[in-house]
Every structure is written in structure tokens, then in C-alpha cells.
Image (cartoon, helix red, strand yellow):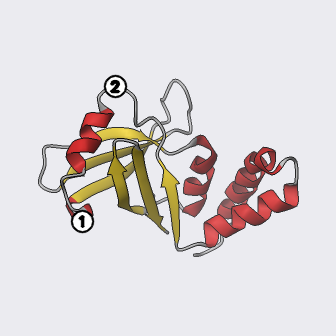
Amino acid sequence: MKMTIETKRKVMAMGNRLTAKFEGDRRAAFVKAWELVKKSEIEICVNGVTFANRQEVLKRLAKYEPAQIKTVLVPEPDNKFDKNAIAVKVGVNFGKGLFTIGYIPKTFTAVVNAIGSNLPALKVLSGDIFGARLALAV
């Protein structure tokens, strides 16, 4: 991964956000931030999968092989709850479109944005009635 000034700036923002999770230990937070950015794959649980009819969508998706499921990340700068929100949209290959199954957790939006201007490809690890786990291929 090419480390640009912009990437470093975003990692700094991510480290600052992670500091609270590390009980104020900024060093540990920044070490974790760099580890996440340098990984070739990051596993993330998607938030909001119990909202509306998303459970039904996940049940239907469970019938398909992961290779048949198209998953994309879509930034939502106009989201009324979080201007940095990143929606996780899925569809079945050759289907009629994409459906929002949830959102990247707020603590990981900085990670995803730090990876680069092109959002990463995703692979579905699982999608069941308890939630959805995704792996971001960096």
C-alpha cells in the first residue's frame, strides 16, 4: 500500500478515534490503527442488520454461494446521522440491483477511508439472521 500524506492523516484520525477504546492509551490506539491499515484483509461486522426487513434479505442471501453475492461500499455524505457513513450494499449476480444491509461501524469508517480513495473489494464471510460479517480485501 502506498503511504501518502493523506493516508497518514486519516490514520491519525483513526488512531484518535480508537484512543477511547484503549482507555486513553494513544500509543496502543495508533499501533492498532497502523496494523489495521497494513493488513491485507480486515474482518468487519456490519451494523444495522436488524433494521427494517434486512433480516429477510440476509436469510435470502444465505441460500447463495458467497461468490454469487456482489457487495459494495457506498459513502453516504448526506446521511442525516453520520456524514462519514458508509453503506454496505449487496445483490446477487445478475440481480435487479443492490440493497442496503447495514453500515460499516463508525469506528471503522476512518479505517476504510484510510485505505484509499477507491473503496476496497469485499467478500462475504457470512450472512445469517444474526448479522453479516465482511472481509475487506485491502
Q: Is residue 6 left or right of residue 29?
A: left
> Percent from the top left, x then y, of residue 119?
45, 58
Q: Amino acid at mark 1?
A: Ala
> Percent from the top left, x then y, of residue 111?
60, 56
Q: Secondary structure at mark 1?
A: helix
Q: Earlier in the sequence, mark 2 or mark 1?
A: 2
Is residue 24 something that shows in the picture? yes
Disc 1 crowd rating (10 Å Cα; few below 14, some 14-19, many 20+) is few
> Percent from the top left, x then y, of residue 9?
72, 57
Q: What's the residue at 41%, 44% (across, down)?
A: 131
Q: Secondary structure at mark 2?
A: loop
Does 79 sit above or below residue 117?
A: above
Q: What's the residue at 73%, 63% (across, down)?
A: 32
Name the quarter where the N terminus is drawn: bottom right
Q: Which image quarter: residue 10? A: bottom right
Q: Is residue 37 left or right of residue 100?
A: right
Q: Is residue 6 left or right of residue 1?
A: right
Q: What's the residue at 26%, 56% (across, down)?
A: 70
Q: Is residue 78 left or right of residue 35?
A: left
Is residue 98 something that shows in the picture? no
Residue 52's disc is 2
Identify the residue under disc 1: 67
